[in-house]
Amino acid sequence: MPSPHKLRITWTRSAIGTPVRHRATVRALGLHKLHQAVFHDDTPSLRGMVHAVRHLVTVAQVTEEEFTAATTRVAKPPAFILRSGPPADAPVKAPRGKRGAKPAAAQKAAAATTAKAEKAAAAATAKAEAAAAATTAKTEAAAAATTAKTEAAAAATTAKTEKAAAKTEAAATAAATAPPQASPEAGKEAAAKPTRAAKAATATPETAEKPKKAAATKAPAPAKAKAPAAAKGEAKPVRARTGGAKSAQEPKA
């Protein structure tokens, strides 16, 4: 039969570093955080548990009235009350206009902004079109200049070719119709050497006989006498030095 008395058990010291059995006993008593207090019936088994962890908890005996007062919860008034509608003394708001309706000032500002955006877009489009036209014109002018330059170069080449062909044809025609001419060197040699007829016309009896007499009087030149060869074993004569102070040495016997 349970005792009419109650025990108030308060956890006063931490269970860190204590044996596992002591920590399990504290949890079995219903204590989960420090300085927490619980109420239990005064029974021998409970007193045994309390004795096992007496260095961690404090125990006090309370009556039934104290237990009821400690465990009874006092109802707190709510912090706020929810009502279905506005209070009776709330001020009446002015009725709102149509949803999405804007005042005249806002409409005017929106119209000005729209007009400004359209004007900027039109200016940007015109600028882009002008830039594209300028680029196209520049490209066309460059292409026309290149074409004209190519045509002028082709015309100049054709004229040069025709002129060279005409010159070659004229030279060939002139060479075909002109009589053959001797070379300038042959003409000079012919002019320098008189012909036989000219020599015969200008020759006198005396000049004609001179070559014949010269051929008759011309005798063969005598052959040069060779020096006698030295005998075997004899020394060759040594020429004397003309410019030196020393005289020539005599040959050895």
Image (cartoon, rainbow, N blue to C red):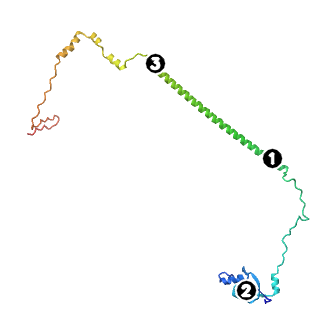
Residue lying at 59% horizontally and 31% vertically, measured from the top left? 147
From the image, tell me which residue sits under label 2.
Answer: 58
**Relative image position of residue 113 (x, y in whole percent):** 78, 47
Picture quarter containing residue 42?
bottom right
Of callouts 1 and 2, the N-terminal one: 2
- In this view, 35 is above or below 175: below
**149 on left or right of 42:** left
Residue lying at 23% horizontally and 9% vertically, measured from the top left? 205
- In this view, 37 is above or below 184: below
- In-front residue for pair 155/188: 155
Residue lying at 17% horizontally and 15% vertically, measured from the top left? 216
Of callouts 3 and 1, the N-terminal one: 1
Number of marks drawn: 3
Which secondary structure lies at badge 3? helix
Looking at the rendered image, the quarter that the N terminus falls into is bottom right
**Callout 2 amino acid:** Thr
From the image, tell me which residue sits under label 1.
Answer: 111
Task: Give the Cα separation between the discs numbered 3 and 1.
Answer: 92 Å
Indicate which label's residue lies in the foreground, 3 or 1: 3
**Relative image position of residue 71 (x, y in whole percent):** 80, 81
Residue lying at 33% horizontally and 17% vertically, measured from the top left? 190
**Relative image position of residue 90 (x, y in whole percent):** 90, 63
Task: Give the Cα separation between the discs numbered 3 and 2.
Answer: 148 Å
Q: Do the residues labelled 3 and 1 touch (CB within 8 Å)?
A: no
**118 on left or right of 250:** right
**158 on left or right of 129:** left
Which secondary structure lies at badge 2? strand
From the image, tell me which residue sits under label 3.
Answer: 173
Looking at the rendered image, the quarter that the C terminus falls into is top left
**Callout 3 amino acid:** Thr
Answer few, some or many: residues within 10 Å of disc 1's Cα (few below 14, many 20 plus, some between 14 and 19): few
